Amino acid sequence: MTACMVVSKDQKEALVGYYQVLAKPNHGYSRILLKGLNGDFEYEIKGVENTFFGDELMNVGIQLTNNIFDAHFGVNESGDFSSKLFKLKAKEW
């Protein structure tokens, strides 16, 4: 698994790319830990109902599991050559 991330200078938007070349059989849970976000901002991830605070995404990350990840983020982590682009945007108050 490889992840690449770009964050805007004002930390209000970010793009995260998730890339898997070869699947690993029966591997445990994995996470994408994000960096460079504002811990006080609440972020929306496009296509996901829940919102997440920046400190949560940087310390806990986005958990990738076959059931949860497929349902929330639309990626099948069990296949070879899978990828997903996450678009994060800070929630406006």
Image (cartoon, rainbow, N blue to C red):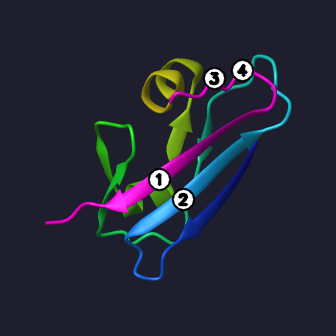
Label placed on residue 76: 3
Q: Earlier in the sequence, mark 4 or mark 1?
A: 4
Q: Where is residue 38 drawn, in percent x and y? A: 39, 72
Mark 4 — residue?
A: 78
Residue 23 quadrant: top right
Mark 2 — residue?
A: 15
- Disc 3 residue type (three-letter): Asn
Q: Where is residue 17 drawn, in percent x and y? A: 64, 51
Q: Are marks 1 and 2 in contact (CB under 8 Å)?
A: yes
- Disc 1 residue type (three-letter): Lys
- Of circles 4 and 1, the one toward us is 1
Q: Where is residue 20 drawn, in percent x and y? A: 77, 37
Q: Earlier in the sequence, mark 2 or mark 4?
A: 2
Residue at x 36% of width, y 60% of height = 89
Q: Are marks 3 and 1 in contact (CB under 8 Å)?
A: no
SS class, disc 1? strand
Circle 2 Cα neighbour tier, 10 Å, few/some/many (<14 / 14–19 / ≥20):
some
Q: Earlier in the sequence, mark 3 or mark 1?
A: 3
Report if residue 60 is visible in the image.
no
- Cα distance in 3D space between marks 3 and 2: 19 Å
**Looking at the picture, does residue 2 appear above or below residue 8?**
above
Span of residues in magenta? 74-93
- Disc 2 residue type (three-letter): Leu
Q: Are marks 3 and 2 in contact (CB under 8 Å)?
A: no
Residue at x 38% of width, y 38% of height = 47
Q: In the rendered view, does 66 fall on the left or right side of 27? A: left
Residue reaching furthest right?
A: 22
Residue 28 quadrant: top right
Q: Are marks 3 and 4 in contact (CB under 8 Å)?
A: yes
SS class, disc 4? loop
Q: Earlier in the sequence, mark 1 or mark 2?
A: 2
